Image (tube, rainbow, N blue to C red):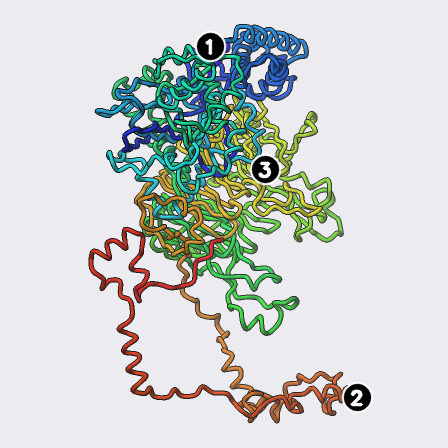
Amino acid sequence: MHESYAQNVDASSMPMATAVSVSFSSLPSEGGAISFDHPPSQLNSSVSFRPASSGGAYHDAEPPPKKQRVIPPEVGAKGPWQSISECIEAYILPAVDQQVSCLSDTGLQLGDLEDISDKVVDRITNDPRFKTEYVLSRGHLTLSCQRLLTEQIADEVNRLSEQRVPSNSPDEELQRSVTPTAPGPEFTTTIRLATPPCLTPTRDRPLPSIETPNAPHVATPSATPNARRQTARASETGNHVSPLKYRRQARALAWKYPEAQKSRLSSTGSQQPRGKSKKRHTYLSLPRLPYLKASDRKRILRGSAEFFLLLRPPPHLDQGDSIYHVDFTREESETAWRIARELRHQRDAATSASPGELESFWTSQRGADLAALAKQICLRDGLERRDEDAVLNFLEDQTRSQTNAVATALSLELDELDKQGEVVRRSRLPSLLLTREMEGGRGFGRMRRLVNFTNEFRKLREDDLELHAEWTGCAGDIATITWVSNNGYLCGTTAHSDAHNQQYNKPGNLLLGSPSLGSLRGYPQHRIVRPLVEKGENASEAMRESQDPWLYCSVVSSDYDAAHDRAFTSSFDKTVKVWKVDKNGAAMELLGTWPHEGNVNFVAASKNGSGLVATAADVPSEAVRVYYVTDGDVSSSPYRTFSGSRTWNEDDKNTQETQKWAYYPATMQWGVAPGVQHLLLVGYSPRSFSIHDDDIPEEKRQSGEICLWDCITGERRKVLTATTQNVFEVAWHPTQPGFIVATSPAGLHVDEHVRTQIRVFRPTDSPDEIGAFTEVQCLDCTAADINELTIMPCSMSHCYITAAATDGNVYVWDTARGDDPIHVLCHDVPVEESSGDFYERERDDTGVKFTAWGTSQDRFYTGGSDGMVKVWNVRNLRNPLVRDLLEAPGPISFGAFSPDRSKLAIGDATGRVFLLSVDEADQQPADCVELGASRAGPMATLTTSTSTSTSRRRRRPKGFQPHATPPPPEGMEPTSGRAEARKYLEAGQLRIHKNPCIGAVQGERYPTLGMYYAQLHKDGDPLQPLVGYVDQEQRENATMYSQKLRTLRAPLPPSSDTLERHRWNVTRDLDLRALPALTQQELEEDGVRLDDFSDEAAWDFEYEEE
């Protein structure tokens, strides 16, 4: 087997809780400042393995086209593949650390040791012997190979330590320097580096240089230091802000605060004109100028966790840039040189020295007691702002020739909105367009790799998905979403309808959304008359009177027939309703209703244009119906019923036991590819009539049935394998006549850890079984329950298969690579995780409920109970995670793309609906509230030095538009409390006491109500007087009430003196707008908001965030 290795740029993790940028600033000598922003560069690199291809080299983030991987037979028994990074961390880094630690007494500096470690790792990982051993052992190195590696590492470390010579300045490695035209640096250049860094590997590239007339050139990073060790040990940095979480937080922050969004978008435009920079030389006001050693600065630029922990929180971060390094100016360098010569008794007439003489002098001081020399030099004439630590670090750099040719200042800067990351992402499109124009459609040339431009443009379009709208207040968990056009979608939710929680039932179970109108409207059609509850808190008369007479039922499934422009919704009100929906999502009309005998869990419309619609209800027999829709009278459409062959008493037809369970439809799908669109695939699983699975016999819990019907002829097609297993989910191939089924494991040789299996079915080639489907591949899965299945073709004969499970993972297979998953895509812990003793995640959690493919194999979307919607590239075998797209306050419960893949609707378990779109036209006007300064939150750090006020406007989610209140059911007139009270008074059962403080008491006919408590009367007879201790507590015997009724006293008419005083007070009121124009301008420049003092200003309570 022929392999090749490639080196990727991959940023390491950063432990700061907020985004940090590194700024390079030169030190002015004549004043003035100009700021330029550049795209961030990636800071770290890591080693990765990829098979070579005859088609040319490929970038790790964009793998080559699909090819079946050939693995030697002996490899299969060595366990799962271990990635190259895991292999390096497990076997190479510990040995390198052990050998390098022995050099601590040799006098080498920390930077030298780091460089030696990096070079050793480089040479070992590029050794062909290591590559061969890695492939053959699948990343699990043998003991003999480990011993050889240890010996080789020891030899390399000894050789490098003996040959060690002073290295060049690390800042010179990171900078492209040009000698300034005037002594001393002149102006500032700010470069925000991507922090936290992006995990998407990209190729090293120098940042563009900027030429400014009559000004010295600016140092900008041009190369990336080697930092494999940092990448391999990213997990040791503790709780850090991942680049994906950082980008997601930046996007969410920009969406919540409209002013921040404008600032974020404006950052991607043109640079600020000269003289308008907000950057100022803040280090000029520092009492002490810091100076870090070159090795320390190099590690900070790499994103070293150790140094960022030392800098957190930065001392000046709340006031602007945090200056952590300022180079010595030419004058300071000569001052240190002159003082050192005096202390070394080298007195002569020279008062200045050339750069060569300075370097020669300081090199001669190598090995001297620099600490004592620094103590004598610091804080003297010309170095008043340089303390002992700064001088010592400077002297060490001078003796090692690691100072910068051009003096710079380095600072940390908050970049909470990820402005520079947005610049890089937006610059990708013009780069591709230019390359395509110059190179044509080949996609090689300047790209240095094969590029499919069509696929790249599609990914760029998808990656522009942003949150554009959010609605809240729906009836319950979002259970289904169906797009009826690119501008309208149906949404169904669960509802509280059990006897113990009916008091929480509310409208909003069926909604219609329109992205262009920015609306989400409720519809009341899926409802029933509220049943009477005999037991529990909902059985009281007060609860019955206070609740809506209608009970809104869960809408759990929906579908759309594009050929006939009809939408369908199924509900727990035991009906399926047919709708005519406007293309713009403005309104919809009910066409008909199909009643069923049980809760309808599924409704699906065939895509063959015949108008067939299948439904599945919770009934033991004839649960599946296929309707042949009649255009004129939809409600009277005929249907055909289907039933599975298995029954609960199939083992003993004469049993006398009471039926407690049955086989119910667990999933249902129509064929998708041409030629199978008339086939209906249904999976059955056992389910108890109650909520307890103990009612199902142990031997039947993993049983079920796979049924395939031809709905044109009504015949059942044969499925030749595993037809009696419990079925979790099914899915059809999008372009070929085949399907996959997730079932319980079956077979004679099933591994112990396998708990479910995904079976791939295709039409059989046997002439004796025409029309039958047989299993061609079985994929093992360790999850106990499967929620969703998807298929994405990657060739004519193979495809990607994904299975989303309740354990919070998504398992991905490439059928060309065998039966083991190539990825296990993990979501985090659930938002609503329980910590009880009996909690089991796979049983009690919903796991991953949303999976969908984008426009290509490079984008796969998942949403789980951690509230996250993630984007993956499953073709990237090393780092599949692309970004975190959305963070919801509750578990993700459903999601669906629009037909053109330009919009994505997401629902969560808190009743929220999120709309993401690539089109800025879908952005709705912000509904904002004013926040107080103490509640401004992250916005407090987003203001610039030129702002006159702190932005405190926060966007809040909108509620859906409720429908009109339906009229009460026939024979049930609503009664108010006043009407009921009047009825008792008119009947004489109650009367109003003459004392208004007492109110209503018993009337003459009160006994007719029969509301006496017999045990409180003498001898238990309600007609007898009350017992003594009860009688004395009656209100009529109490004397605490007063006959006086407190009322408000009428105000006295104002006197002439009072009116005169009022008029004088009015003349003393301050009117800022009446001040002279010059005074108003000065106040506004000082940050005074004149409108806040007007009578029209809103002085409401501050908005409290969640």
Residue placed most toward the observer, 861 or 468: 468
Could you tell me which secondary element the residue under label 1 belongs to? helix
- How far is mark 2 from mark 3, CA to CA? 71 Å
Q: Are marks 1 and 2 in contact (CB under 8 Å)?
A: no
* Badge 2: residue crowd in 10 Å (few <14, some 14–19, many ≥20): few
The amino acid on which the numbered mark 3 sits, given as a three-letter code, is Ile
Q: Which residue is mark 1?
A: 364
User: Foreground mark, 1 or 3?
Assistant: 1
CA gap between label 1 and label 2 equals 116 Å
Numbered badge on residue 1019: 2
**Side (left or right) of 322 relative to 1054:** right
Viewer-nearest residue: 958 or 176: 176
| Residue 736 as seen in the image, left or right of residue 917 | right
SS under mark 2: helix
Residue 478 seen in this snapshot: yes
Tell me if 561 is positioned left or right of 748 in this view.
Answer: left
Spatial distance from mark 1 to mark 3, Cα to Cα? 85 Å
Question: What's the amino acid at mark 2?
Answer: Asp
User: Residue at 47% of width from left, 47% of height from top?
Assistant: 907
Q: Quadrant of residue 992?
A: bottom right
Question: Which residue matches tag 3?
Answer: 706
| Quarter of the rendering containing residue 736 | top left
Which mark is on residue 148?
Answer: none
Report x, y in % for residue 914: 43, 47
Seen as rendered, the residue at the extreme right is 1019
Residue 665 in the image: state x and y as whole percent. 58, 45
